[in-house]
Amino acid sequence: MAEKRNIFLVGPMGAGKSTIGRHLAQQLHMEFFDSDSVIEDRTGADISWVFDVEGEAGFRVREENVIDDLTQKQGIVLATGGGSVKSKDNRNRLSARGIVVYLETTIEKQLARTQRDKKRPLLQTDTPRDVLVSLAEERNPLYEEVSDYVVRTDDQSAKVVANQIIKMLEER
């Protein structure tokens, strides 16, 4: 990959976007960003607090601004929040400004990977499986719409998935 195009990772929570993104960025000698972490840095509070105070709508406005800023950079790997694709503006920016990789995973894997995570406001419920199923129905078509590549992350380590993505990009 002579020219460093942006690589944007989309997919549901628990798909491994942040972990895989860090591996990718390290191997490709690119800068890594996680949109949720940038939102927390800029806000000075965690995502749960933003959801509590501003609701999901307020959070999504912050997310759009951060994704607009980050996607204008060159040669970055960006792990987006699971719901970022709900915004048509975000989908357009991601598509236009880089290569979008959809990290696909099962509901079972999502549950296993997120069960102890208290930083995911949408999962702070008695029925996280129902929430994940509902989110998948709404968002999976949007991930597919925006992506250039789809990679399944269920039974592979983050490093293996990162290498798979690099290989796909080299064959492009």
Image: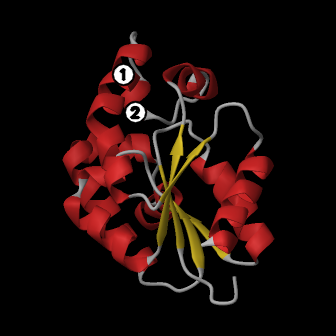
Q: Nearer the viewer, residue 67 or 145?
A: 145
Seen in the picture, residue 2 relative to 172 is either above or below; the reply is below
Compared across the picture, whether 76 is left or right of 66 comes to right
Q: Is residue 59 visible?
A: no
Q: Position of residue 25 (x, y in %)?
A: 70, 69
Q: Is residue 130 visible?
A: yes
Task: Report helix, strand or loop for mark 2.
Answer: helix
Query: What kind of colouring is applied to the model shown?
Result: secondary structure
Q: Which mark is residue 51?
A: none
Please tell me which residue is depicted at 38% across the width and 69% down the height of the picture.
94
Seen in the picture, residue 120 relative to 148 is either above or below; the reply is above
Q: Nearer the viewer, residue 169 or 83?
A: 169
In the image, what residue type sits under mark 1?
Val
Q: Which mark is residue 133?
A: 1
Compared across the picture, whether 69 is left or right of 38 comes to left
Please tell me which residue is depicted at 66% across the width and 70% down the height of the picture.
171
Instruction: Give the image quarter of residue 165.
Output: bottom right
Q: Which mark is residue 121?
A: 2
Query: How many neighbours does mark 2 have within 10 angstroms: few (below 14), some (14-19), or many (20 or more)?
Result: some
Please tell me which residue is depicted at 37% across the width and 49% down the height of the picture.
144
